[in-house]
Image: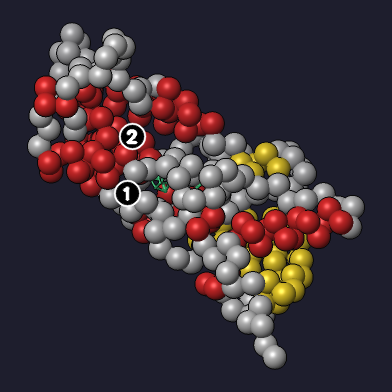
Amino acid sequence: MSTGNMNLTLKVWRQKNNIAKGSLVDYKLSNISPDMSFLEMFDVLNEGLVDKGEEPVVFDHDCREGICGACSMFINGQPHGPLQGVTTCQLHMRSFKDGDTIVVEPWRAKAFPVIKDLMVDRTAFDRVIAAGGFISVNTGNAQDANNLPIPKVKADSAFEAAACIGCGACVATCKNASAMLFVSAKISQLAQLPQGQPERYRRVQSMVSQMDAEGFGNCTNTGACEAECPKGISLENIARMNRDFYSAKFVSEEEV
Ligand code: SF4
Ligand code: FES
């Protein structure tokens, strides 16, 4: 009787370190449950490799529930695999068929160098955030929410931008390895709220300059980032960031 379980061939990118030449290595897996998550399927692969005395495949993961942005696998040519609006950890094996061959590669971008196998260094994103993705306020008791009325439309739009989990799929899928969807989301979540106004123009200049220094490419409006983003971050954020970036040139030094 069929169990509905699957036999699969994986072609997984193996690379010893940042300077080694990597290659795709074939692995056969059998009896994989369609209810496993993609990362659980990798756990099965790694347990088998450890049992054989081989090195497990290194890959990033943390929350395994679509929140942290750590899981970063390029699956059959798509970041986070074939489903829209989900991260790799939320992808299940029922999205594949018995007998499938699945190619798994790391994010590929100059600003995201491979550390080992499927794990890449995404600290470039941290440095962009450190350049301006914050507000400077004195700490103390939380204000009464009614002190800062925010129109619902603005609050919703800022919240949608804040949904970015910093996974880097937008960079990985972009032919220019542009980080503009990520950076614009981080700018937009603050630029639409009163708390973000005092540093608004300094922030956009500083974060864009860090983004360029990290070696991310430019946006040429292909829209692959928006199509592949697991959190549905809109291209409108890039338009907002560009408007603020140009406006910053006309704001007096004191204001910036
Ligand atoms: S914009 Fe989307 S794809 Fe890019 S880092 Fe944020 S959540 Fe990931
Ligand atoms: S492991 Fe946290 S989003 Fe996938």
Q: Position of residue 228 (x, y in %)?
A: 41, 57
Q: Nearer the viewer, residue 31 or 200?
A: 31
Q: Which residue is mark 1?
A: 233
Q: Nearer the viewer, residue 57 or 138?
A: 138
Q: Quadrant of residue 3?
A: bottom right
The type of residue carrying mark 2 is Lys
Q: Outermost residue toward the bottom?
A: 1
Q: How is the image coloured?
A: secondary structure
Q: Position of residue 106 (x, y in %)?
A: 61, 51
Q: Position of residue 25 (x, y in %)?
A: 76, 61
Q: Would you say 83 lies left or right of 198 here?
A: right
Q: Quadrant of the C terminus?
A: top left
Q: Position of residue 114 (x, y in %)?
A: 65, 42
Q: Secondary structure at mark 1?
A: loop
- Residue at position x 83%, y 53% from top? 50
Whether the residue carrying mark 1 lies under 8 Å from ligand 1 is answered with yes
Q: Would you say 129 lies left or right of 119 here?
A: left
Q: Which residue is mark 2?
A: 186
Q: Quadrant of residue 75?
A: bottom right
- Residue at position x 59%, y 79% from top? 97
Q: Nearer the viewer, residue 89 or 185?
A: 89
Q: Are marks 1 and 2 in contact (CB under 8 Å)?
A: no
Q: Outermost residue toward the right?
A: 53
The type of residue carrying mark 1 is Ile
Residue 218 numbered mark, or none:
none
Crowding at dot 1, Cα within 10 Å, few <14 / some 14-19 / many 20+, comes out as many
- Residue at position x 56%, y 39% from top? 112
Q: Is residue 206 visible?
A: yes
Query: Where is 143 relative to 171, above or below?
Result: above
Q: Would you say 50 lies left or right of 8 here?
A: right
